[in-house]
Amino acid sequence: MTSRFSWSRKTPWLAIGACVPAVALAWLGFGAIVDGERAAETVASKRAQSASALILAALARDMRGAQLLVLSAIDREPRTDSDVDLLDPIGSGLARYAYTDAFFSWHDGDNPDAVTFYSRAERPPHWLPTRTPPATSPLVMSSDGVLGKRLLDRVSKDAAQGHRSSVFSFEVGDGRYQVVAALSYADARPQPPTAVLGFLVSLDWVRANYFGALIAEVARIEGGDRDLVFAVFDDRDRVVAGGPVAAGALGDRRAFALAFFDPLVVAVDPPGDLELPSWAVAVDASGDAALAAAGRTARRTLAVAAAMWVVLGAGLLLTVWGVQTNATLAAMRADFVSAVTHELKTPIANMRAINETLAAGRGSAEMTREYARLGNREAARLTRLVENLLAYARTTDVADAYTMELLSLETVVDKSLQEFAPVLKDGGFEVHVDLPEELPPVRGDATALGLMLNNLVDNAIRYSSARRRITVAAHPSGADVVLSVADQGIGIPKDEVSRVTGRFFRGRNAVTGGSGLGLAIVGRIVADHRGSLAITSEFGVGTTVSVTLHGVPS
């Protein structure tokens, strides 16, 4: 018994032993793929951080350039009585820094309201009077007394405190501006300045034009071959330039102040009328070429690995199924051999004991007749077993041919019940036969159909309980004839009904004895006769086996 179940016990351990290396390999492979993707993401993130830092540096350098490089001219060069002296530095500032809408200047001795404005000939501010520029200069010099006075009045507030710079927000018409000015003094401060040089930045123009050009330039330098996406957002998180940047995308986002000057000049004493919204620059690296290539490689690797794991898993399942099937088959065959051996030994031992008793001459004439009857019964029992074994050998090996002829089911039923008459009588069975007279004959092999019916009756006897009633009935069904054997025995569990026709199968409620071949042989005989087999059973109530055979019209 131990050797019979050794394989079934080893099967789970074999499966586990085969799965552990596969799982370990899958884990290592998956870990390598994940690490590769993380490394690619880290590289892409570093590129995004580098690009955003580059953009911020470019913004800081450019947005402070007009103040640091142009306005400083008021301190580096002595003033004369002519505004022409400022044409070179202002012209350079307008050409280099696109965000400057116009420069303005005022110097000591001028009319306090006489402020000179310098603008581009191709992009004059809408609030300055139109003038025709000189043929040799791209600049236009003009004046606006009202606007100039407003600017000087505001600058004077910072001059009264001795500031060297004046930075504030300003409105001209419906336009929003940021004004940056440098103040020059003759000697000690505070005192009225001797000169003022400044510029105006149109925030509306900046929003519409400035950042887009700068972002495009940085993108060409940093991310043109890496599929990085750049964007600038305002203080309300609206896209100003670039994009689109996906939500939660892999990348970097950094804030900057919308200040066209050095923020240090207002760090100590920020003016109350200066608006400094916080904008942000973002770089999306989710479309980075290296990251995309790593993702494609990871997906291909995962697909190949998944296919390998599926094949390996299928192989393991088939192996486990094959081992379990072989173990089950071996166990069923062992049970079959044990059952057949028992079934052979029992009638042989009984017949031997009967013959020994008769040979000794013991007992009366009545006892001799009883022993003879018992011997016939054991001989019939042994004959049925041998016929089943021969039928099993025939159906599994050589498919021996049948002798087909017209048969009356009434004859087949009578012969079978006569063979079982002693057993039925001794067991106290009530047998009910229902065969109508108009039942048509069937075409079949007499020996095979007799063996089929014997197995059905034998099963009905074996599995009957206290209600010992067996019904053998037949009725025509169209051109066919349906033969059924019903008992009121222990029944078959629902989960076993579809398996009872399998070879060697014995249910968990099977009684002692039997080879497990009866219904398997019945099924094969029915199939060879091109008929059909149906089994209906209710556990604890009884079982009905119905066989449909081809009838022959009269």
Image: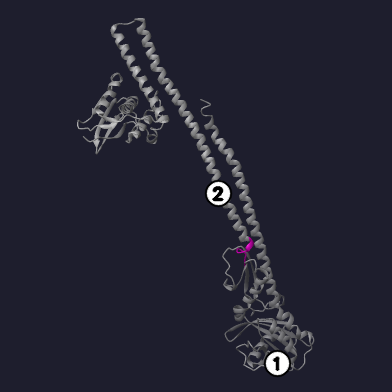
Q: Which amino acid does label 2 sit on?
A: Ala
Q: Where is residue 547 in the image (x, y as percent from the top left)?
A: 30, 33
- Region of the chain picked out in magenta, as a range: 283-290
Left/right of residue 276 with respect to residue 525 in the rendered view: right
Residues under labels 2 and 1: Cα distance?
Answer: 76 Å
Give the number of the disc on residue 333: none
Instruction: Answer whether labels 2 and 1 touch (C-beta < 8 Å).
Output: no
Residue identified by numbered label 1: 136
- Height in image: 258 above or below 323? below
The magenta stretch spans residue 284: yes
- Tell which of 292 and 402 is nearer to you: 402
- Height in image: 8 above or below 377? below
Does the rendering let one see residue 163?
Answer: no
Residue identified by numbered label 2: 307
Q: Is mark 2 on a helix, strand or loop?
A: helix
Among the 4 quarters of the image, the one containing residue 79: bottom right
Q: Earlier in the sequence, mark 2 or mark 1?
A: 1
Residue occupying the point 33% across, 17% down:
377
Considering every residue shown, the one lying at the far top of the view is: 361
Q: Where is residue 285 in the image (x, y as percent from the top left)?
A: 62, 64
